[in-house]
Amino acid sequence: MKRISATVISIFILLLGSHTLGGQNLSDLRISEIQAVNCNGLTDSYGERNGWIEIFNTSYGSVRFAGCFLTDDPSELRKYHTPSSDSRTVLGPRQSVVFHASGKESRGTFHTNFTIGNGSTVYLVSNDGKTIIDQLTVPQDLPADWSVVKVPCGVKMMDYKVTTTQDPTPGTYNGDVNAKSNSDIMKEKDPHGFVLTIISVMVVFLSLFILSRIFKYVGKASMRSGKKAPKPVKGKGMSPEAAAAVALALQQEYGGEAEAAIAMALHSYLSECAHDRESYILTIRPTSGSQWNDKTQTFRKTPRR
């Protein structure tokens, strides 16, 4: 019981650890949008307009990005370091955060120590200062107040295509917020869940059928490959009842010492001279080489009891 409890606890800890690691996966972060020339758009807490960089969490778990780096220089990957002490450096599922590229790091966590312009490439670097998580380049001919943006596409909305837009959306989801998911589409086509139920039942029965076939063939293969049980050797050993019956029959038929009768009965039984024709009759059949009737063969000493 203790061993089972320890195993269950170990599995629980492993699952919890894997969940935590999945929630802290920095590779889920993306540079989702950049505006280099901001004339009439977003203002910071000081009322100024600067270029800005949007970071998006593509996962469905929270990601702490404290300690990561932002840079516009591939030869200096540790240019701007996100403070590890700021509690705001946690991105919730499918959420985004905006960094102001003001060049004034002293204004707070979300102000970088570099500025950006058309043609700039921004790199998001992991907290090891070496691994580039993502990068995005601002086109040289991008008009003022436009932004370069990564728009989600594909069935799972986890892949992105780079495009430009004249309607920047800093801090909000890039793409169609009203887009229907696969579950929404399925709900419209099968409102009562009949199709889903039938498919689920078919999948379960098909899985059970395949498993039964696998177990059947594996069992047959293991039986063929295993060693065959040795066949019983005729005349090797007998039950106490058979030995007693043989001894009583010989004593009744010939008289004499019980020990001699038992010994000869065993000898005859093992030599296949004794056999049962019926369940209640024991037959003794001497062989040609038997010396049972030879009067010259006598025992000089009684066997020990």
Image (cartoon, grey):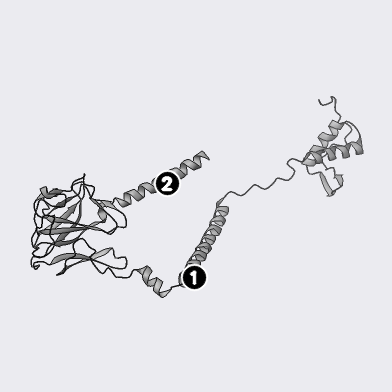
Res. 218 in view: yes
Dot 1: element? helix
Q: Position of residue 111 (x, y in %)?
A: 13, 52
- Label 1 vs label 2: CA separation? 33 Å
The x, y position of residue 46, in whole percent, is: 11, 55
Q: Nearer the viewer, residue 163 or 296?
A: 163
Q: Earlier in the sequence, mark 1 or mark 2?
A: 2
Residue 223 image offset from top left, x and y in percent: 58, 53
Q: Is residue 155 above or below residue 105?
A: below
Comparing 289 with 157, the one in front is 157
Q: Which mark is residue 12?
A: 2
Q: In the rendered view of the protein, which quadrant contains the C terminus?
A: top right
**Total residue callouts:** 2
Is 69 in front, or is 274?
Answer: 69
Q: Amino acid at mark 2?
A: Phe
- Residue 247's mark? none
Residue at which label 1 appears: 198
Residue at the (15%, 65%) spot, across then down: 148
Residue extending furthest bottom? 189
In contact (CB < 8 Å): disc 1 and disc 2: no
Question: Who's the residue at 83% across and 47% down the image?
Answer: 276
Q: Residue at x 57, y 54 (%)?
A: 224
Residue 76 visible here:
no
175 vs 305, left or right, is left
Q: Secondary structure at mark 2?
A: helix
Amino acid tagged 1: Ile
Q: Quadrant of residue 51?
A: bottom left
Crowd band around label 2 with a 10 angstrom C-alpha radius: few (<14), some (14–19), many (20+): few
| Callout 1 crowding tier (Cα within 10 Å): few <14, some 14–19, many ≥20 | few
- 185 displayed left or right of 256: left
